[in-house]
Image: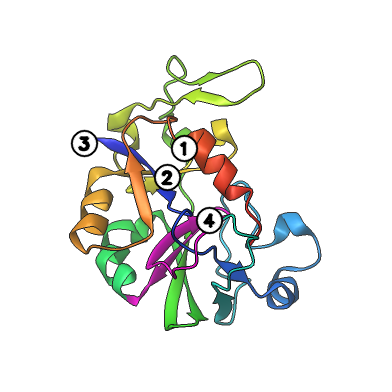
């Protein structure tokens, strides 16, 4: 089964924003412990004990679009509106945890991914290349090993990107969900994705 890098279309769609006061009240003052911090996957089921408040107010300084997405990957998590949740929940439920949110258009969910390629020795180190500045030039996986995961990340590129199986891509495209795009050239969109992730939320 083919693998893809998932990334958000910030040219058109607005960036998710969290209620910082709520996040701090739930997660504490250490930024590395907060839910909206990109780091090694860890569960938050015992920490996020209330529905999260998010919004898509355009405060990106023109670095992102203004349309509210139906699905979006940002800061190591994935937003899903109700339509996206029902399209994907049965496929990805074993690879992370869902948290309810409210936003401008009602209710939705944030998916917290917990699987790493390294968990199954799934990183093909012969295909993973960084340049002299440490930027990713190529990514590669042992597909049979990581195929047990619908969605996963890797420590090699500091947990930045979402990688997925073809059935995830098919479910998103089949439901005509707006906000995400894909590439089968793993690592090819990494530079673009990194630039997008630097946009303020």
Is there a contact, CB below 8 Å, between mark 1 and mark 2? yes
Task: Using a 10 Å C-alpha cutoff, classify the residue at mark 4 as few (fewer than 14 neighbours), some (14 to 19) or many (20 or more).
Answer: many
**Side (left or right) of 3 relative to 53:** left
Q: State the image coordinates of residue 80 (x, y, percent, origin top left).
A: 40, 68
Quarter placement of the N terminus: top left
Is there a contact, CB below 8 Å, between mark 1 and mark 3? no
Is there a contact, CB below 8 Å, between mark 4 and mark 3? no
Residue 74, which numbered label? 4
Is there a contact, CB below 8 Å, between mark 2 and mark 3? no
Q: Mark 3 sits on what residue?
A: 1
Q: Nearer the viewer, mark 1 or mark 2?
A: 2
C-alpha separation, residue under disc 2 versus residue under disc 4: 14 Å
Residue 44, which numbered label? none
Q: Mark 2 sits on what residue?
A: 152
Quarter placement of the C terminus: bottom right
Does residue 71 show up magenta in the picture?
yes
Residue 100 in sight in this render: yes
Residue 160 in sight in this render: no
């Amino acid at each position: 089964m083919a693998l893809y890098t998932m990334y958000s279309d910030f040219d058109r769609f607005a960036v998710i924003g969290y209620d910082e006061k709520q996040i701090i009240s739930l997660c504490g003052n250490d930024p590395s412990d907060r839910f909206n911090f990109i780091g090694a996957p860890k569960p938050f089921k015992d920490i996020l004990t209330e529905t999260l408040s998010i919004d898509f107010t355009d405060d990106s300084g023109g670095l992102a679009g203004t349309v509210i997405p139906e699905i979006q990957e940002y800061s190591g998590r994935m937003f899903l509106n109700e339509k996206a949740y029902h399209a994907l929940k049965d496929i990805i439920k074993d690879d992370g945890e869902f948290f309810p949110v409210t936003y401008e258009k009602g209710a939705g969910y944030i998916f917290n991914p917990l699987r790493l390629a390294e968990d199954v020795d799934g990183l093909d180190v012969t295909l993973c290349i960084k340049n002299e500045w440490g930027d990713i030039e190529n990514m590669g996986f042992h597909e049979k090993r990581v195929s047990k995961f619908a969605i996963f990340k890797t420590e090699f590129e500091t947990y930045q990107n979402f990688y997925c199986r073809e059935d995830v891509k098919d479910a998103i495209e089949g439901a005509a969900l707006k906000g995400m795009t894909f590439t089968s050239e793993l690592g090819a969109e990494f530079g673009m994705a990194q630039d997008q992730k630097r946009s303020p939320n």
